[in-house]
Image (cartoon, grey):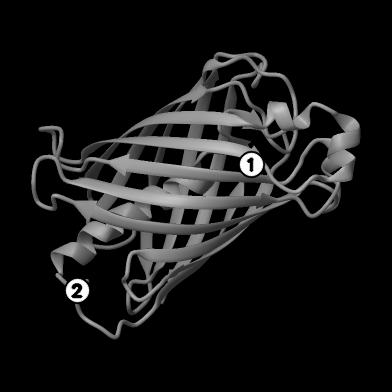
Amino acid sequence: MTRVVFSMVLLAAAAAVAQDAQDEFAESPKEPHAMIGTTWDSQYIWRGFDIFRDAGAIHVMADLNLFDSGFGVSAVGHQSLSDGFGELQRWDGTLYYQNVLWSGEPLATNFRLGYVCYYYPKTNFGLTQDLMEGHVILSWPNLLPIQGLQPSYAFAYMWPGRENHWAQSANPTFNDDCRGMFQIFMLDYAFLVPGLLSADDQVVKLHSELVWNGGLSPLGAKVNSGISDAVIGASTDFVFGADRNIVLTPAIYYQFSFEETVNPDNEFWASVSLKFAF
């Protein structure tokens, strides 16, 4: 489920545009802003991989924007709904910096630099090892002439972290299989429809992405480098609360899997997330 990392990233990068428009960066002190939330997925697909073996998943997240400085921290926990909340679990911790270049110009660029630690607290059936990642995400909201159409690009380099003895014993070459890059090319389109639950217009978001895998697997398996998969999806937000700070987001996605060593199956899954900002 690429969404867990990169949807949050793109939303955060978009928030940097609003901050820049308000011209608040130079003022201090700042009030911290935070978001907490949870997501249910009928299946956990991450960069083409079926992480939890066809099982559904619950994700919990917290994100703290450090005083509108552009720096922030986030944590996301992933728990399989199979095996009685047993072995399949992962936690992601991220430090990031995000901002915007050339605001208001045709080449306006939202960017985010991040460092991620993927921590597996349980054995995960000998499939996984703690991993590290550095990434950069770029998006261009004004580049294309069609309003609401936004291209984005993500580059991520991953390498092994702490050696879990269970992963090493299951696969002695785990280090080699978990070192390399991902590239993700994304195109999103947002448009308005009449409100479904209120008088406000409803924003519908269409998402597409193409994933290039440099020959690495978070599951410690040999994979071929190249274009691994393509994803299409649709989502919308329902906003609630007196301060309009509670957001319910249903979504559906479909993955076309091209590289069998990453995933031999096409995938369809549904998602519902609930977030609270304060």
Residue drawn at x 26%, y 48% is 110
Residue 167 lies, with reference to residue 176, above or below; the image says below
Q: Nearer the viewer, residue 123 or 265?
A: 123
Quadrant of the rendered structure where residue 214 is? top right
Residue 258 lies, with reference to residue 189, above or below; the image says above
Residue drawn at x 58%, y 28% is 48
Q: How many marks?
A: 2
Relative image position of residue 163 (x, y in whole percent): 80, 45
Tell me, yes or no, whether the two marked residues, 1 and 2, touch with CB atoms within 8 Å: no
Relative image position of residue 168 (x, y in whole percent): 85, 36
Q: Amino acid at mark 2?
A: Glu
Q: Nearer the viewer, residue 49 or 242?
A: 49
- Give residue 24's mark: 2
Q: Nearer the viewer, residue 83 or 250?
A: 83
Q: CA distance from mark 1 to mark 2?
A: 40 Å
Determine the secondary structure under disc 2: loop
Do we see residue 31 in this rendering? yes
Residue drawn at x 81%, y 35% is 127
Residue drawn at x 19%, y 75% is 26
Relative image position of residue 3 (x, y in whole percent): 49, 42
10 Å crowding of disc 2: few (<14), some (14-19), many (20+): few
Q: Earlier in the sequence, mark 1 or mark 2?
A: 2
10 Å crowding of disc 1: few (<14), some (14-19), many (20+): some
Q: Quadrant of the N terminus?
A: top right
Look at mark 1 in the image and give the residue it sits on: 42
- Viewer-nearest of discs 1 and 2: 2
In the figure, is residue 60 to the left or right of 151? Answer: right
Q: Quadrant of the C terminus?
A: bottom left
Q: Amino acid at mark 1?
A: Ser
Residue 93 lies, with reference to residue 23, above or below; the image says above
Determine the secondary structure under disc 1: loop
In the figure, is residue 117 to the left or right of 208? Answer: right
